[in-house]
């Protein structure tokens, strides 16, 4: 899977706002080139965290995935507790094409895959769909309040 394939899949789910900070934007330099996915059919960034992200480099304190290797990236996905418990493999976070607990945000039930490929493509798609559905449900519940 490529970053563009993942982005195309997520945006096709509907109501998705993709933020891709670049040089010259108001976003911190460390985030330039990364992608942040929100459920926001009105195009306004909602309060709270995105439901998924793609990072293309190591962040300070988050080097275990070794994303500074050429061509590496990591897709990060917010999961339900049940899904997290079923999907997270207790393994080295730098291993490619394997669903693992996020190196920093596992306690918040985030999953991660470095360079998703044939072994994880179907799972990544399902996890992204579920994360989108959960974000949409939260947004609809807030709108009804």
Image: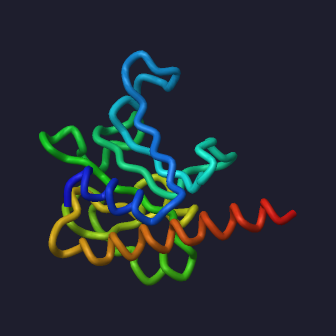
67, above or below 15, in the image: above
Could one spot residue 107 in this view of the protein? yes
- Compared with 122, 114 (above or below) is above
x and y percentages locating residue 100 in the rendered image: 35, 67
Quadrant position of the N terminus in the picture:
bottom left
In the displayed structure image, the side of residue 68 where residue 60 appears, left or right: right
Percent x, y of residue 16: 50, 54
In the image, what residue occupies the spot 30% across and 58% down? Answer: 6
Residue farthest to the left, as pictured: 70
Q: Residue at x 31, y 49 (%)?
A: 64
Residue 102 in the image: state x and y as whole percent. Answer: 42, 59
| Residue at left offset 24%, top offset 44% | 67
* Count of numbered marks: 0
Left or right of 120? Residue 100 is right
Q: Position of residue 99 (x, y in %)?
A: 31, 70
| Residue nearest the observer in this picture, 119 or 103 | 119
Identify which residue, 87 or 45, lies in the foreground: 45
The answer to whether any part of residue 90 appears in the image is no
Query: Residue at 40% across / 62% down in the picture?
Result: 12
Does residue 96 sit above or below 84 in this rendering?
A: above
Q: How is the image coloured?
A: rainbow
Q: In the displayed image of the protein, which residue is found farthest to the right?
A: 145
The quadrant of the rendering that contains the C terminus is bottom right
């Amino acid at each position: 899977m490529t970053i563009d394939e993942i982005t195309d899949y997520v945006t096709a789910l509907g109501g998705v706002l993709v933020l891709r900070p670049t040089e010259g934007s108001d976003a911190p330099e460390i985030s330039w080139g990364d992608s942040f996915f929100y459920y926001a059919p009105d195009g306004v960034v909602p309060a709270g965290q995105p439901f998924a992200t793609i990072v293309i480099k190591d962040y300070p304190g988050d080097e275990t995935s070794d994303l500074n290797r050429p061509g590496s990236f990591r897709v990060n996905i917010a999961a339900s507790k049940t899904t997290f418990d079923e999907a997270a493999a207790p393994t080295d976070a730098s291993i490619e094409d394997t669903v693992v607990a996020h190196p920093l945000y596992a306690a918040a039930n985030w999953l991660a895959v470095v360079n998703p490929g044939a072994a994880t493509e179907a799972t990544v798609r399902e996890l992204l769909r579920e994360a989108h559905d959960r974000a949409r449900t939260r947004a609809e519940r807030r709108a009804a309040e």
